[in-house]
Image: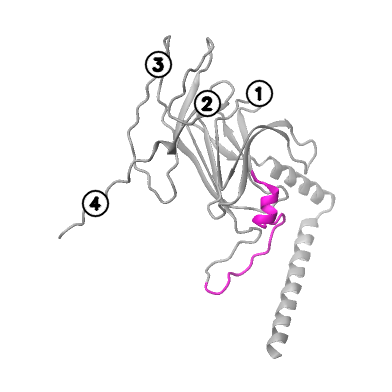
Amino acid sequence: RHRPPAPPPPPPLPLACYRLHVIDGETGACTSFAGLSTGGLAFAEGSQGSTLIVDVKAPPGQAMAEVDWAATVLADTEVQVSAVPLEEVSAVEQPYVPNPGFRLFRSCVSCAGGVAVHVACPGAPGAALTLRQLQVDREPEAAGDDRQTSVLRSISGVGCVTLLGLEPPAEGSSAEALIECVIDAPCAISTLHLPTRPVAAQAAPPGEGGQAAEGEAGLVWTMRVVGPAGLTVKEDDSYDKSLAALAASWEAAQAGRAAKAKAAREAYLAQVADRGAAADEDGDEK
């Protein structure tokens, strides 16, 4: 049989598609360069040095091919240079769950040099995203409270956003970095029309398959974390635990409260469904 020739490899990408970043090993601060040269870098004696990362972004519709790379380091003193393989330690794709702050997620990342966190909304290229690293100032003092935090680093983007490098935690605090991504409120309200409270499941229009699950709003986001082997990423569930503790205190004070509330909600939803069905029947008769 005659086999068609293999397709040619994608053409090389222009230099403008490459970016060079230097992440300070002590502060986690990231400096980006337009070209592929850093210029002079000063290191104090005994410092932890820096991590160099090159990222590539192809133009829309153009594929990327695997390429070889090389780096040249010039110094006026003896330096140690090593290449550290990076791994995709986390790849998450989840729907937006309605909440008052339009938060997509809050996660804990074990700190390490050369960490890259990328968040995107594939179906909403106009989404205004803010990705930030937080510092925990105070843990919840009472059941139902959230952690009190302040912003250490923040970066914004439209459609997608990437945070390179994480600031090491302060002495005496957790060894993990707390990161979160939110959709800016004006964009979430005026452009994306995102709800802040759970929405009921609705059947798909005729000709379209599937339906949105109860509580979801249809927006899907993705998060990718790339870093050295051994890096860990986990969801920050401190607020969920605080809410669970609050619900448990209510149940302890009034036994059966949760079951009664669930029964009342189901009865109300059944009444709404019956009214809708009756209205449809009246419209058909007319």
What residue lies at 68% left-to-right and 64% top-to-bottom?
Answer: 200
When the figure is inspected, residue 77 is found, relative to residue 105, above or below; the finding is above
What residue lies at 51% left-to-right and 15% top-to-bottom?
Answer: 42
What residue lies at 63% left-to-right and 37% top-to-bottom?
Answer: 132
State the image coordinates of residue 125 (x, y, percent, origin top left): 55, 52
Callout 1 amino acid = Ala
Look at the numbered discs 2 and 3 and tell me whether their residues touch, using CB distance below 8 Å: no
Callout 3 amino acid = Leu
Among the two numbered marks 2 and 4 on one chain, the one whose residue lies closer to the N terminus? 4
Instruction: Locate the N terminus and report the quarter of the image it occupies.
Output: bottom left
Marks 1 and 2, how far apart at CA: 18 Å
Image mark for residue 74: 3
Marks 3 and 4, how far apart at CA: 41 Å
Callout 4 amino acid = Ala
Q: Is residue 186 magenta?
A: yes
Which residue lies under the disc numbered 2?
23
Callout 2 amino acid = Ile
Which residue lies under the disc numbered 4?
6
For the question of whether residue 194 can be seen, the reply is no
* Camera-nearest label, 1 or 2: 2
Among the two numbered marks 4 and 1 on one chain, the one whose residue lies closer to the N terminus? 4
Which residue lies under the disc numbered 1?
170
